[in-house]
Image (tube, rainbow, N blue to C red):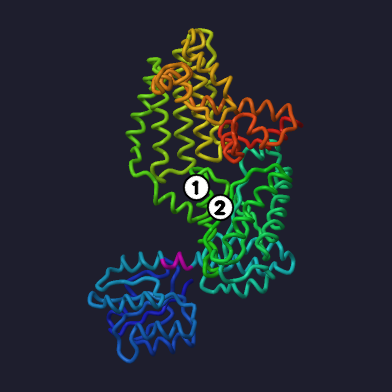
Amino acid sequence: MLRLLIVEDEQLTREGLADLIDWASIGIRIDGLAANGLEAVQLLAAQPADLLLTDIRMPVMDGLQLIEEVRRRDWPTTCILLSGYGDFEYAQKAMRLGVTDYLVKPCSPDDIRSLFVRVAESLREERRRTDRLKGIESRLRASVPHAKSEVLRQWLRHPPVVTEDRRLQLKQLGMSVAFEYPLVIAVRIDHRSLDRYDERTSDVKLVTFAASNIMKETLEQTLMQPIEIVLEQDLLVAVGNGLFEWMEEKVAAGAAKLKDNLQRYLRLSVGIGVSDPKPTLNELHEAFREAAEALEFRFFLGASVVYRRDAERWKAGALPGRLRQAEMLRVEQAAIEHLRAGLFAELLNDTEAWLTAFQGEYTQSREDIHGQTIAFLSRMLQTAAEIAPPGTDVDADPARIREQVHGVDTFEELNGIVYRYIRSVVEALQSRKPMKRKVQQALDYIAERYNESGMSLAGAANALFVSSAYLSSLFKQELGVNFLDYVHQFRIEKAKALLQSTDLKIQAVAREVGYFDEAHFTKTFKKWTGMLPSQYKKETQL
């Protein structure tokens, strides 16, 4: 039972508060009644209460002075204010003093009961959390590393409870991080990197353990400070300290080095999210939320390392004209109708508009976008299978679609999957039709000059004596792909052959196929294959 002290100078009101409500039914018992703040302080000094319901205006010591005294003596009492309509300024001050809630007179017994049901449950939940923390602390001597991880997880998930002293816990646990200015670096391993382990739990745990060791060693070297590492949900989380004014370059170098080391030693590609520093460890849950949110924005931004401020800038600069759900459904229907009519250029244009709509405003999660994409592709492939000539093979396996879509880590990779499916559909439906002469000439032109850095739609159109718009439309209609995407896919296929059959370095392969910026080549390769060139090279040369 929670103990309640009622403080009210009017006797009838005081006794009515005690008698008109069935306090026992909500797990509360009346521990005392007081006519003013001074009487309440004397009662609390003799027997502290869990809950305090006090009026504002009272003789001797009013409600605000009582609450100030409770706070000064550091009594663990949850305070609730009973105020009149004219007491708004007093109520505001009370809220600043840490009052949990307030009731405005006159109020019904049902109003009072409802408020105390909510407050009592919140207090019980806080105590349950406190008990869990105490349980963790009691096991410290038996298992300090485990207890340290459990406490860190609690801090990452929740703000501190009233009785919690994190500075003291740091000392008791022997944690290496400081109390002030914590920041969080969260790492998520890309889905494809774990595919080779066939979901064998022991192998995945071993790889995760090795990754956490590499993470700790790398970040401690580059940040030049102790780091705590913990596994939270599906993320490897590093907690360090420092303000960006003097840590920014070190954090950037550490994140880049960590990404390289995980790829080099474990063949893992990862996404990294970095929070803003927070004033103290009491706000660690906010830092973790920021780092995890930054990781979610990696899907849209495509970068391997995303800072919280990058995510905020992306949200602030998002395109204002996002298509509404009804409009997106209209575009989907138009795409299906164009597919049925054999208007493949229009199908591709509709799909480009549909994909662009997702980037207009950050209102949908990655899971939502995955689900809509799977539904759209399944519908498109089913339609293609229905209209395809007999004997034409259209891959419409929904399980394969789900696997591929859920395996992507960025929105750009998702685009690549959608466009590859459209190209395969158009190729299947056009397989028995002769290719237009200008398209074949354009393909020959690309095959001869694909490794030239200046390859462009305008250059190919000039060579074939047609307009860029005509050649672009022709490509979409005949091949189901736009000109530049075809060039990129052609180059990537050539790069894959070189990676399989030669010992050329990645930079050399990139130049051989027409990319003179290795970073651009790597990003393009991952978009169209779902893996990094280095991953592909190692896996195909085993």
| Separation (CA) of disc 1 from disc 2 | 9 Å
**Which quarter of the picture shows residue 511?**
top right
Q: Is residue 408 above or below residue 433?
A: below
Where residue 344 appears, x then y in whole percent? 42, 19
Residue found at the far left of this picture: 86
313 left or right of 171 in image:
left
Identify the image quadrant of the C terminus. top right
Disc marking residue 297 = 1
| Residue in the picture at 39% in, 24% down | 335
Where residue 420 appears, x then y in whole percent? 52, 26
387 left or right of 284 in image:
left
Number of other residues with Cα within 10 Å of mark 2, as a class: few under 14, some 14 to 19, many 20 or more: many
In magenta stretch: residue 372: no
**Which quarter of the picture shows residue 193?**
top right
Disc marking residue 358 = none
Residue range corresponding to the magenta coloring = 119-123
Q: Which of 470 and 208 is in front in this view?
A: 470
Q: Is residue 322 above or below residue 282?
A: above
At label 1, the amino acid type is Phe
| Main SS category, magenta section | helix
Where residue 304 appears, x then y in whole percent? 58, 46
Q: Are marks 1 and 2 in contact (CB under 8 Å)?
A: yes
Residue under label 2? 273
Mark with earlier residue (1, 2): 2
- For label 1, the SS is helix
| Residue in the picture at 44% in, 54% down | 312
At label 2, the amino acid type is Gly
Residue found at the far right of this picture: 542
Residue found at the far bottom of this picture: 60
- Count numbered badges in the picture: 2
- For label 2, the SS is strand
